[in-house]
Image (cartoon, helix red, strand yellow):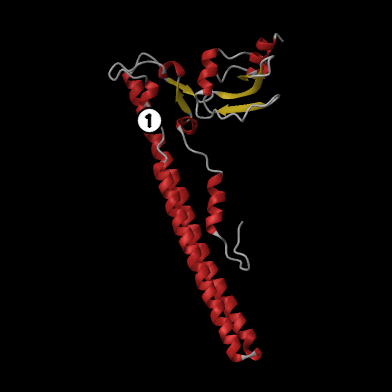
Amino acid sequence: MAHVPGHNTINPYEYYQEFTSATPTYDTQQAYGDLGIAPTSEFLGQTDPITGLSYEDLIPEYDPYNEEMLRTQFRSGAEGAYQGAVGQLSGIMGQATEQLGQSGFTSSGAIQSAVDTTRTDLQGQYGSAFSDALLSLTSGIRQERLGYQESVSDLLSSFQEANPDQNIYQEVGESSIANVQTGGGERLTPQQAETIKQSAQWNPPEPTQGASYTYSSPVYGQHIFYAYYRPDGSFGGWRTQGGMDAATGG
């Protein structure tokens, strides 16, 4: 964890950057995973008779605005408190230096002890305030995501009530795509492959010869894709093992 050079004061601004760098952007697929259920791909492709839109289009994406506001407020408050703490500490050190110059060597131990005690108290107060602010941030984000989950759940329930003749639900991980064992040589259909590549979790690296990419989704399961290159050396897309075998004649 980052510290101020020459001091033991934690820099919350840098800690905040570390905290948020590992925070994924929440999306509908993750909400399905948290709920443990998801609408089937067949249902999502159907058209709502009232609006004329597909049911997939009627499910709103998660709006991260409030999350970002919470992070902005936390960052601004933590940075301001940090600068204030460092300013107070600098003032204490300045006063101590002045007192040392006036009192001489005999009182230096007592003055240094007082400075150390004040610094410890200041750091303790600051650390407690920072911990409280971080707790408020994380609990606020959790409430935002729980609220979205509840909205999605209520919407899916209304869809089910409007379509009593079919079961619109599937357990997460039980989709037709998730059941395809691509690691064992089975092939995805073009439609299945396109569904995966349009999902929020699709984020392959820059392709290179021999590169592989492990895709994982709470709805569509886990599949390993390989960078396929044509005989002329041009990149031909990401394919599962079965797709690679079909392309190369293996």
At 41% across and 48% down in the image, what residue appears? 69
Farthest top residue? 249
What percent of the width, then of the height, locates residue 129?
A: 48, 62
At 58% across and 90% down in the image, what residue appears? 102
Mark 1: give few (<14), some (14-19) or many (20+) Cα within 10 Å: few
Q: Is residue 176 visible?
A: no
Q: Is residue 74 visible?
A: yes
Please state which amino acid type lies under the numbered disc 1. Answer: Pro
Q: Quadrant of residue 109?
A: bottom right
72 vs 187, left or right, is: left
What percent of the width, then of the height, locates residue 221?
A: 57, 24
At 54% across and 67% down in the image, what residue appears? 124
At 54% across and 72% down in the image, what residue appears? 89
Question: Label 1, on which residue?
Answer: 60
Element under disc 1: loop
Figure check: 124 above or below 195: below
What percent of the width, then of the height, locates residue 148?
A: 40, 36
Farthest left residue? 50
